[in-house]
Image (cartoon, helix red, strand yellow):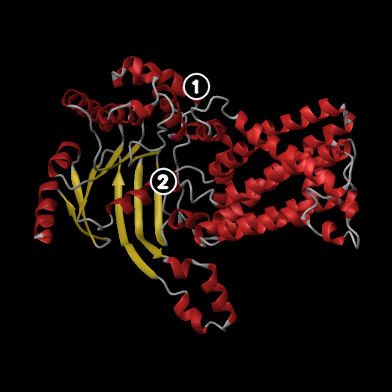
């Protein structure tokens, strides 16, 4: 059996120097990526679990989101006095993408806490839990994106080739989900108030981010949206699917958030990786 | 060369209770110049292992003996690489297979077959590697068509068989066992004992934490006595158990 492939542990002398801690953290992430068969299976299993023995199974994801999007779409189209043909695709994408981002953050809070038994029983890369959560939410997103396809069919919308830009957009969202899970998962394992705090913040962000309302509806300055990184994270996928290109500032903010996020998360992971087994 | 070397290993467990673990106290502590912080962030620390040194080489079968809370499981977890110690060095050469909880990662809603796959993935095998061992594992469980049923329909004995069969299908260089391995009905136990015997023999190093002298005599050649996180005695099993009984009495 090839030890590398078998993933069983071959340890080196433990050394407290920063250099080896960095190497260990990077090895954890690299080995975790190599275990894709494991987290891939676990991600699917999470989905099947939630809908076990129900008749339509994971399509409940699509159905519940569809009902929410439909109801909100019609209601707020009335409020804002917008034609449903313009408003529904916009709000549908907003809610679907926001669902992906917000659930990823909430799941990220408990990424290590929820895997406590595995972490304490088995020497496996901690990053597999992060990849599992990201993968699971990507599967949910795929289920939900069927809603937008239906809306496109109903209203005869064709975003054109620009829609392809949503693919790198999604990729960047996933990359951000990974660093965010590492960081808040680690902090939440130590400070158990953070999951509750995050749940509250996310609820408020839903209203403060242009999801059900459009930036152009802002009476005063657009700054309230432009300064909100979540606005740009949504725009980077929403705009292409509406047939428009995300603005340059959106690209810059999203790339900036990704870079800074990885630096901070990696710093924390390098420093506290070995403590997670004690904290969970 | 397979080996485990522990040099002056110490492990501390901070116990965070509701107060010291919360952000509130940290923030208050920061806001009040640390006066409350001195009280607010102080938490109990349990010294699980202190200054433990040991050299375990190829061919060693070592039993960890000691009262509850002596540090046996913690030491096993250090050897498994789960806990990285606060102080000291751990040098481990060889693939480590910890077998602490046979039901780890088993999913009650999935079938026996799916669980074999899942557990194998947890152990670090690839799907292709598991496929090769699949029939062997399935035969060993003697569960037949039950393997197609979800795990929640299994009896406790059937469950244990499956878990045991999956956990012992790998070939580790270093095998770490926590007590309480092996369950099921009498006929299966006999078979399991043979299997465990062969499984243990294949490994280069075996470390077993147990209270049972019988089990230790069967699998091990020497013993380490732990008490309050320190190594009290190392030596032949009968001598160490003699000391253990004195300590308990």
Q: Nearer the viewer, residue A141 or B89?
A: A141
Report whether residue A255 is seen: no
* In the image: residue B226, left or right of residue A144: left
Q: Nearer the viewer, residue B196 or B158?
A: B158
| Quadrant in the picture for the N terminus of chain B | top left
* In the image: residue A185, left or right of residue A173: left
> How far across and how far down the image is residue A234, in percent?
78, 46
| Quadrant in the picture for the C terminus of chain B | bottom left
Q: Which residue is mark 1?
A: B128
Q: Residues within 10 Å of mark 2 (few under 14, many from 20)?
A: some
* In the image: residue B217, left or right of residue B22: left
Asked which secondary structure carries label 2, the reply is helix
Q: Which residue is mark 2?
A: A117
**Foreground label between 2 and 1:** 2
Q: Nearer the viewer, residue B109 or A81?
A: A81
Asked which secondary structure carries label 1, the reply is helix
Q: Quadrant of residue A198?
A: bottom right
Q: Quadrant of residue B165?
A: top left
Residue at x 42%, y 33% (from the top left corner): B107
Dot 1: chain letter: B
């Amino acid at each position: 059996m090839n030890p590398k492939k078998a993933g069983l542990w071959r340890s080196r002398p433990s050394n407290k120097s920063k250099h080896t801690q960095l190497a260990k953290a990077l090895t954890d992430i690299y080995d975790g990526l190599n275990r894709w068969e494991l987290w891939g299976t676990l991600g699917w299993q999470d989905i099947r679990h939630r809908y076990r023995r129900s008749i339509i199974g994971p399509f409940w994801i699509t159905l519940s989101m569809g009902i929410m999007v439909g109801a909100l779409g019609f209601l707020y189209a009335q409020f804002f006095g917008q034609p449903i043909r313009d408003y529904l695709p916009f709000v549908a994408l907003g809610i679907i993408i926001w669902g992906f981002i917000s659930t990823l953050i909430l799941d990220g809070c408990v990424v290590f806490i929820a895997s406590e038994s595995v972490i304490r029983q088995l020497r496996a890369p901690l990053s597999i839990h992060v990849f599992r959560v990201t993968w699971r939410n990507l599967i949910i997103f795929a289920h939900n994106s069927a809603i937008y396809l239906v809306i496109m069919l109903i209203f005869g919308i064709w975003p054109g080739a620009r829609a392809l830009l949503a693919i790198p957009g999604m990729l960047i969202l996933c990359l951000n989900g990974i660093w965010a899970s590492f960081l808040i998962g680690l902090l939440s394992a130590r400070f158990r108030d953070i999951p509750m705090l995050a749940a509250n913040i996310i609820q408020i962000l839903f209203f403060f981010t242009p999801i059900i309302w459009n930036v152009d509806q802002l009476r005063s300055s657009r700054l309230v949206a432009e300064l909100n990184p979540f606005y740009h994270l949504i725009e980077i996928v929403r705009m292409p699917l509406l047939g428009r290109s995300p603005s340059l500032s959106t690209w810059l903010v999203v790339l900036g958030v990704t870079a800074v996020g990885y630096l901070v998360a990696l710093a924390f992971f390098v420093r506290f990786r070995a403590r997670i087994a004690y904290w969970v | 060369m397979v080996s485990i070397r522990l040099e002056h290993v110490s492990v501390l467990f901070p116990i965070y209770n509701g107060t010291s673990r919360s952000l509130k106290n940290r923030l208050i502590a920061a806001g009040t110049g640390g006066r409350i912080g001195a009280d607010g962030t102080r938490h109990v620390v349990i010294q699980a292992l202190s200054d433990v040194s040991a050299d375990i080489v190829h061919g060693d079968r070592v039993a960890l003996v000691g009262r509850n809370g002596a540090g046996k499981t913690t030491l096993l977890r250090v050897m498994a690489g789960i806990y990285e110690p606060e102080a000291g060095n751990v040098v481990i050469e060889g693939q480590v297979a910890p077998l602490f909880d046979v039901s780890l990662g088993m999913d009650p809603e999935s079938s026996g077959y799916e669980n074999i796959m899942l557990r194998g993935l947890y152990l670090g095998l690839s799907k292709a590697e598991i496929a090769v061992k699949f029939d062997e594992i399935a035969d060993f469980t003697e569960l037949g068509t039950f393997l197609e049923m979800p795990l929640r329909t299994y009896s406790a004995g059937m469950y244990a068989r499956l878990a045991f069969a999956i956990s012992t299908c790998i070939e580790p260089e270093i095998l770490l066992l926590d007590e309480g391995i092996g369950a099921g009905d009498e006929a299966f136990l006999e078979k399991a004992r043979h299997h465990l015997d062969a499984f243990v023999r294949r490994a280069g190093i075996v470390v077993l934490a147990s209270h049972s002298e019988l089990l230790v005599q069967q699998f091990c050649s020497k013993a380490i006595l732990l008490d309050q996180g320190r190594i009290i005695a190392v030596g032949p099993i009968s001598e160490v158990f003699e000391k253990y009984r004195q300590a308990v009495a």
